[in-house]
Amino acid sequence: MAPVKAMNGTSLLIQIGDGATPTELFAHDCLINTDRGIQFQSETNRQTIPDCDTPDALAWQSLSMDAKSATITGAGMVHTASIPEWHEWFDSGESKNVRVLLNAVSAANGGGHWAGKFKLTGWEVTGARNEKATSSVTLESDGAVTWVDAT
């Protein structure tokens, strides 16, 4: 039996680039401190392929991928020091370089990161009586997202 090569959820880090050139620095923001994830989607086209020998028979569908995208989500307890930067990003409508890092996972164990430009398309800050305020963010890809093996 081969055990699963698992990692802790806190080792999945959303790193946002600072936009500097020629060397951009990436850092995980403490606003995303409980939940985080990346989801890949595709837009598809379906066509029904008829059977020429038996036109009345049920036909099979053919599926082709037309476009790909990725969505990053993150949530956590509000880190108040991060609020101005997140608000500025949302207000700007600009894309930022973002990495989703499998932190401390070696290349031999599948480690690395996804990288691409993302827009902050959703941002929420909520609070309830006698509880700490929370925040959630949604980032959507603005172009290709690539995989980079750990070094």
Image (spheres, helix red, strand yellow):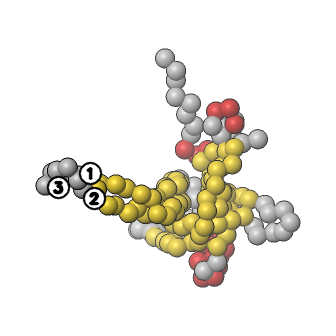
Residue in the picture at 55% in, 34% down: 6
Q: In the image, which disc is placed on residue 48?
A: 2
Confirm or deny contact between disc 1 and disc 2 (CB under 8 A).
Answer: yes
Lateral position of residue 114 relative to residue 134, left or right: right
What distance separates the C-alpha of mark 1 from that of mark 2? 6 Å
Say above or below: 102 vs 89.
above
- Residue 18 is tagged as none
Q: Secondary structure at mark 2?
A: strand
- Residue 79 in the image, given as x and y percentages of width and height: 61, 64
Q: Residues within 10 Å of mark 3 (few under 14, many from 20)?
A: few
Instruction: Name the residue nearer the viewer: 143 or 57.
Output: 57
Relative to 9, say whether 84 is above or below.
below
Circle 2 residues within 10 Å: few <14, some 14–19, many ≥20? few
Spot occupied by residue 98 in the image (x, y as percentages of width and height): 66, 62
* Vertical relation: 12 (above or below) 85: above
Residue 139, percent from left and from top: 55, 66
Q: Nearer the viewer, residue 50 or 124?
A: 50
Residue 148 visible to the viewer: yes
Q: Residue at x 68, y 32 (%)?
A: 108
Secondary structure of the residue carrying numbered label 3: loop
Up/down of 67 relative to 106, above or below: below
Which callout, 2 or 3, points at the residue further toward the start of the chain? 2
Q: Earlier in the sequence, mark 1 or mark 3?
A: 3
Dot 2 amino acid type: Thr
Task: Report the residue marked by disc 1.
Answer: 60
Q: Which residue is mark 3?
A: 55
Q: Amino acid at mark 1?
A: Trp
Residue placed most toward the observer, 35 or 115: 115
Instruction: Measure how far apart labels 2 and 3 are at the Cα level.
Output: 12 Å
Return the x and y of residue 23 as percentages of the image width and height. 84, 62
Disc 2 versus disc 3: nearer the observer: 3
